[in-house]
Image: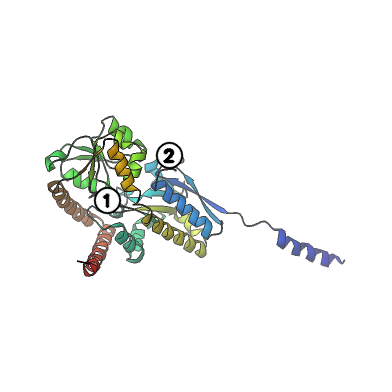
Amino acid sequence: MKPSLIVAAVALACTFIAPAAQAQKIDVASTFPKDMLFLGDALKQFAKNVNEVTDSKVQFEIHGAGDLVPPLEVLTAVSSGAVPAGYDWVGYWGGSIPVTNLIGALPFGPPPEVLAEWMWEGGGKEIVQKAYDKYNLQFLPCASVPPEPAGWFRKEINSPEDLKGLRMRIGGLAGHALNKAGATTQMIPGGEVFVSLDRGRIDAAEFSLPSIDESIQLQKAAQFYYFPGWHQPSSILSVMINKKTWDGFSKLQQNQIMAACRSTMLWTLTNGVQSQMDAVQRLEAQGTQVRRLPDSVLDVLRKATDEVVQEEAGKDAVFKEAYDSLQAHMQRAKRWQELQQLN
């Protein structure tokens, strides 16, 4: 065989035995423990979806709270590029990115399906991205949390007077509203909530859904479990990606990751509720007293929330744009529900 033919044959053979392109692996620093019910599961679902839709060419490697950076430092780490991606309850960043207070939890706000619709089809994602651009971040709204209980209390709440002096773990706009009502609020990472409540450092705490609260044993730290979740009728969990990392993906990969994110949102919308009543019944069997906040307390909190929202809208243009857009979307959704109401 001529040398030229040998070279050609070898080249042709190499095309069949060349190794597959190496997968691009992206570290994700979570604000939650890796195996936390629902909250951790949603990130696993996202990583699974990305792996499948990209045919394993992009892989997100999950790191639980504190494995790479402390939970409340994830935003800074991803913004700086120290970690390429993060996963969070967006409301953790309300002090730096005001609009995250709105989408993290708008007290007396929309149900999950309305918030998700606004985020993906009503312009919400695009408005929020304006705020994230300043932090060198790509915002991906990948999960929705169902309405949460109002929280765990070591004493009964019978009137607005019982809020005065109350020390509570809660953040965001609800925290500001409670402060106006006389409480003292603070944000504590999920892994520290039980100890703080159990040892009496705080008098009350909200964290998440009943099944998740049960898993971190909050029922052993407080007796009274109050509803409704006025503070968080819906909320967003997000994956945020450093812009340099995001821009390193091809356009096809960006679209695939966004599709995986939206698919995860649907997964959370269809997996968050059914197990909660089972958890409530188990908690009641253990001695938990399930209560409803009095209307007089809810009235005070609603009034305080309205004041807080107007104050925040006056401070930040993106917050105001998002709030106005969400309110218009909610009104349309409400009108639709009224038209479809069966007597």
Left or right: residue 136 versus residue 324 is: right
Crowding at dot 1, Cα within 10 Å, few <14 / some 14-19 / many 20+, comes out as: many
* Figure colour scheme: rainbow
Q: Secondary structure at mark 1?
A: loop
Q: How many marks?
A: 2
> The C terminus appears in which quarter of the rendering?
bottom left
| Residue that protrudes farthest toward the top in the picture | 199
Q: Quadrant of residue 125?
A: bottom left
* Pointer 2 residue: 66
Residue 232: assigned label: 1
The answer, for residue 208, to whether it is visible in the render is: no
Residue plotted at (17% across, 36% down): 165
Could you tell which of marks 2 and 1 lies nearer the N-terminus?
2
**Label 2's element?**
loop
| Nearer to me, 114 or 256 | 114
Q: Residue at x 47, y 57 (%)?
A: 246
Q: Report crowding for label 2: few under 14, some 14 to 19, many 20 or more residues within 10 A (C-alpha).
A: some
Left or right of 159: which side holds 54?
right
| Residue 280, visible in the rendered structure | yes
| Amino acid of disc 1 | Gln
Give x and y (percent) for residue 189: 34, 40
**Residue 148 screen position, x and y as percent:** 28, 48
How far is disc 2 from disc 1 in space, using C-alphas?
A: 25 Å
State left or right for residue 142 relative to residue 16.
left
